Image (cartoon, rainbow, N blue to C red):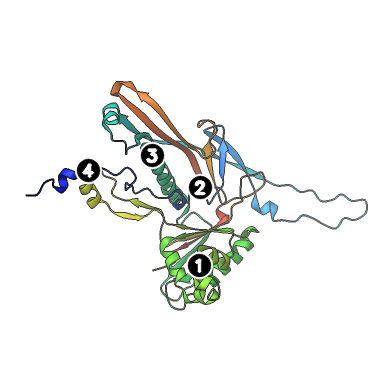
Amino acid sequence: MPAPTQSDLHVNIPLTNVSIAWKQSASTYIADKVFPKVPVQKQSDMYWKYSKSDWRRSDVKRRAPSTETPGTGWMVDSDSYFAHVYGVHKDIDDQLRANADSVFNMDRDATEFLTNQLLLQRDVDWCAQYFKTGVWTGALTGVASGPTTNQFLRWDLAGSDPIGDVALAVLNFRKLTGFKPNIAVLGAQVMVALKQHADILDRIKYTQKGIVTEDLIATLFDVDELYTAYATINTVNDQFPDARVQDQAAAYDFVANSKGMLLAYAPAGPSILTPSAGYTFTWKGYLGGNAQGLKIKRFRMEPIASDRIEAEATYDMKVVAPDLGTFFATAVT
């Protein structure tokens, strides 16, 4: 047998410039993009809600000589928030740290892992709160045939009219609220159907080589911002001793309802006398001034000879004005 052998000349070691981690891009998550964040000093408090009908009414009358102008006013109601604290941590044992190869930056990896978990959970909560039926005043349902009131033909079927359906929904939205929806959030399957829809392809065939983009669909739907909910989650939340077994047992799905779509109005930021479909209240007073509602900290756990990386988030996601949202359910088959 010739010597030296290949194994004598090279011993496999982990590469220092390559590793495989299934971290979703932060841009995939939508919870921080759709509705404004309201940094608050206290964990719970109240906010005012003005009557919509009062602000859509005119009490103005012609004034005769020596008479008073008619009096007017508005009613006000209140609601409250409670910013819950969410958290997770990863302990880095001293023995593991001392024995780790240089390829591992354990503090960095733990920080990114925990941040990813916070962002994922925040999207889960956002979808559970906003991206569903029974929440918004505007409620439309896709059907396989013969649509009637508050129904439309599903957009992956021949003869469907997504542009017309959305235009009519926008018109009704404006009639009800006086505002035009400026944001759309699409489920992943809805985006796939729209990219292949004959009417949309025909509208954009002379632009960008006929490639359907989110910006083009936003233009056709007459909204300022359009997001597709692509974030995914492992629906089997069990941990196994062996990574291969765990990966084989996992099942993945989109966080958001992939067949739904939300039209909504929200301002660029919170302000007085400005309506919004929803707000996310973040407890700034607890997180030391972080308006994003996220905090990562590292501290010593001497009893277990470890450093702890801990991540926390505070938020309460509130539907503030149900009239400022329209949800399209089962928009595709």
Say which amino acid is labelled 3: Leu
Of badges 3 and 1, nearer the viewer stands 3
- Asked whether residue 330 appears in the rendered view, the answer is no
Mark seen at residue 240:
4
* Extreme residue toward the top, this view: 303
Q: Residues within 10 Å of mark 4 (few under 14, many from 20)?
A: few
Q: CA distance from mark 3 to mark 4?
A: 19 Å
CA–CA distance between discs 3 and 1?
Answer: 42 Å
> Callout 1: 10 Å neighbours few (<14), some, many (20+)?
few
Residue 258 percent across, percent down from the top left:
40, 60
Q: Examine the rendering and report whether any part of residue 96 can be seen.
A: yes
Which residue lies under the disc numbered 3?
114
Q: Residue lying farthest right?
A: 65
Q: Nearer the viewer, residue 262 or 232?
A: 232
As measured in the structure, the alpha-carbon distance from the residue carrying label 4 to the one carrying label 2 is 32 Å
The answer to whether 307 appears left or right of 64 in the picture is left
Residue at point 41%, 58% (across, down): 257
Amino acid type, callout 4: Phe
Residue 157: image location, x then y, percent: 42, 75
Q: CA distance from mark 2 to mark 3?
A: 17 Å
Q: Is residue 324 left or right of residue 131?
A: right
Q: Which residue is mark 2?
A: 32
Secondary structure, mark 3, is helix
